[in-house]
Image (spheres, grey):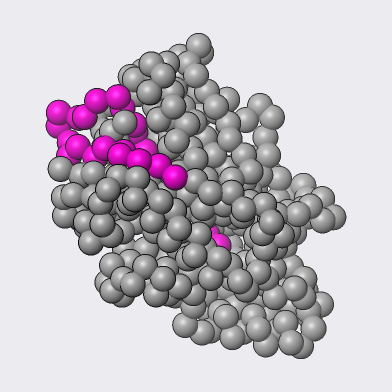
Amino acid sequence: MFIWSAAHAVPPNSYTQTECLESFVKSSQYGQLNPTSQILLRRILRGDNGITTRSLALDSVQEAFNLTPDILQLRFQTHAPALASQAARNALIKADLVSQDLDAVIISTCTGYLCPGLTSYLSESLGLDPSMILLDLVGHGCGAAIPNLRNAHALIHSGQASKVLSICVEVCSAAFYLDDDPGVLISACLFGDAAAAAVCSSRPSVAHRPIQTIAMQSTMRPEHRDLLRFEHKMGMLRNILSPDTPRLAAESAYADLVMVLEKEGISQESIQTWIAHAGGKRVLDALTEKFKLQHADLEVSRKLLEKYGNTSSPFVLMALEEQIKRDAPGGYWWMNSFGAGFSSHGILLKAE
């Protein structure tokens, strides 16, 4: 399978962490938190957590504190289809394709639920062939991009499709929740909204740089399920985020890499470009240490985190897009993500 393009879309409004804190302090929810939680919030939003701004599907940051099931569901239903459609259009433009060139569309999300799924809305907005293969994937969390690409690869390898559009979209502002749990509070300070898409094909593009998938690896560790997952509480999604997540993410991601390198008979020194999901600054630091990388090796992920926050599943596709834009060195590229499950995923790419 070859990746022809990657592109993203974000809401038009971006808010600084300082703006978020100022609005938070004025909200009724702030006064309902205990003093320790208030101190934690101020420390995160004022501190060096690697994030400066976040794009959120809100007309004003005050809307972030309108936390009822109906409001959050409407926020997802309004913005997820629009963001997914825009990312899809952007990816098709970069690939010099139109929607009629596609054989299949796969969409992943975890921050909301629609039935029919997002593919129904995308089919309408892009004018897709009504008999096209349309797949809605849920439950992979932040790591969803690579399982999505694995499904695209399966469709292409089996001959069921020649061109597949893989899309990840998350309206994290539709999954905000507030209470005194530190993981919940950190989540509220960490996530941003975005969609990202990649055009995948059975053959290389004549007009664009060939980027081929060489090997893929996924690992599921259900014994760690409760360290990183959503639960439903009072009709809303509540994110459970353990402080062990950075360590576990780095260890699992490294194990995936080692398995692929051994299978392919190549060394880590052969990897020219690193494309990592940034669960947060601590995750990137843990990856850098575990993989024995230089700080600059994950610069793209750090810059995206600074500008957009953790956009969940679209993030790693946004990092891929940026590496393509920067004309990263040819050779082997390693792309990894992790998420609920606990699961980790990696793809070995080769760019000409």
Q: In the picture, residue 157 is in which quadrant? A: top left
The quadrant in which the C terminus is found is top left
Residue 182 location, x and y as percent? 70, 75
Residue 85 location, x and y as percent? 46, 35
Residue 71 shown left or right of residue 43 in the figure: right
207 in relation to 250, above or below: above
Q: Is residue 203 magenta?
A: yes
> Which residues, given as a range, are shown in magenta?
191-217
112 in relation to 186, above or below: above
> Image point 28% across, 67% down: which residue?
297
Residue 336 shown left or right of residue 29 in the figure: left
> Image point 14% across, 32% down: which residue?
207
183 in relation to 335, above or below: below
The quadrant in which the N terminus is found is top left
240 in relation to 112, above or below: below
Q: In the picture, residue 217 is in which quadrant? A: top left
Residue 196 location, x and y as percent? 42, 45
